[in-house]
Amino acid sequence: MKSLLLSRRGFTAGVLALPFARPAFGQSADAVRRAARGLRQLHSILVSHGDDVVLAEAVRGGGLDRPANIKSGSKSIVALLLGSAIARGEIKLDARLGDVAPKLIPANAAPGVGAITMEDLVTLRAGLDATSGRNYGAWVQSPNWVSYVLRRPMIDRPGGRMIYSTGSTHVLGAALATVTGKSLLARERLGGPLKIDVPPWTRDPQGFYFGGNEMGLTSRAC
């Protein structure tokens, strides 16, 4: 969210710049608070140790209880939901897209997309050309986001090198929704057990929640 996630490098640098009279883990909450206030992109900070909240403060912005776009932190939520589905026996990590969700694959898909596994998608190693960066705008303006991703050229083999592409986690989210019958909203699988609110966020033209961006959570929920 526009708190720790947006400026984690700057926050780390700010904290490391503090004078260390004691080891880093011994720095006071006030020292961290002062460092946080000097980071203009940082909106809120919450630090916990086990069940104890060490520091919780909104230095600017909407506060600790106002949902904020966690951007690509959404990818980690999709990964958690994949783990939940695996634990429930609904899908396997090495399950192939062509086996578990063949209807998601368009007739003019790139050759080999059916062999892409859930592991390939969650680790961003699907082999398909990216939909992030300069390709992002055209992708999210397309009439079918999943189809668009699966029609991208294969620039590496599935399971090969990591290619940062939000489209990969979006396809994973669509596959999970197809297999489990549960959308990524996942209130009973994530929100309920963790006692956090998961508000609705952006959906694609086919109704699949955006699996890799735009999810909103509060600082406390994160």
Image (cartoon, helix red, strand yellow):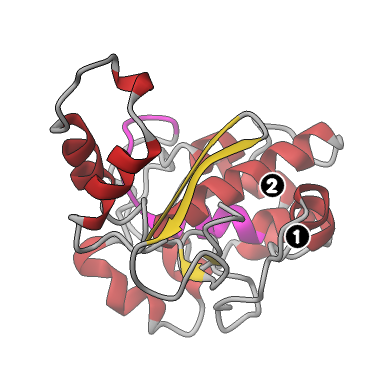
Residue drawn at point x = 23 percent, y = 36 percent: 15
Picture coordinates of residue 159, whole percent (x, y) = 44, 31
* Disc 2 target residue: 81
Looking at the image, is mark 2 or mark 1 earlier in the sequence?
2
Residue drawn at point x = 30 percent, y = 61 percent: 132
Labels 2 & 1 near each other (Cβ < 8 A): yes
Above-or-below relation of 155 to 40: above
Q: Is 104 on the left-hand or right-hand side of 30?
A: right
Picture coordinates of residue 88, whole percent (x, y) = 86, 37
Residue 186: give its label: 1
Comparing 36 with 145, the one in front is 36
Residue drawn at point x = 84 percent, y = 41 percent: 90
**Mark 1, residues whose alpha carbon is within 10 Å: few (<14), some, or many (≥20)?**
some
Badge 2 marks a residue whose secondary structure is helix
The answer to if 166 sits in the magenta stretch is: yes
Mark 2 belongs to which amino acid? Leu
Comparing 114 with 7, the one in front is 7
Q: Quadrant of the N terminus?
A: bottom left
Badge 1 marks a residue whose secondary structure is loop
Which residue range is magenta in the image?
159-174
What is the CA distance from the residue labelled 2 to the residue labelled 1? 8 Å
Residue 199 appears in the figure: yes
Res. 19 image quadrant: top left
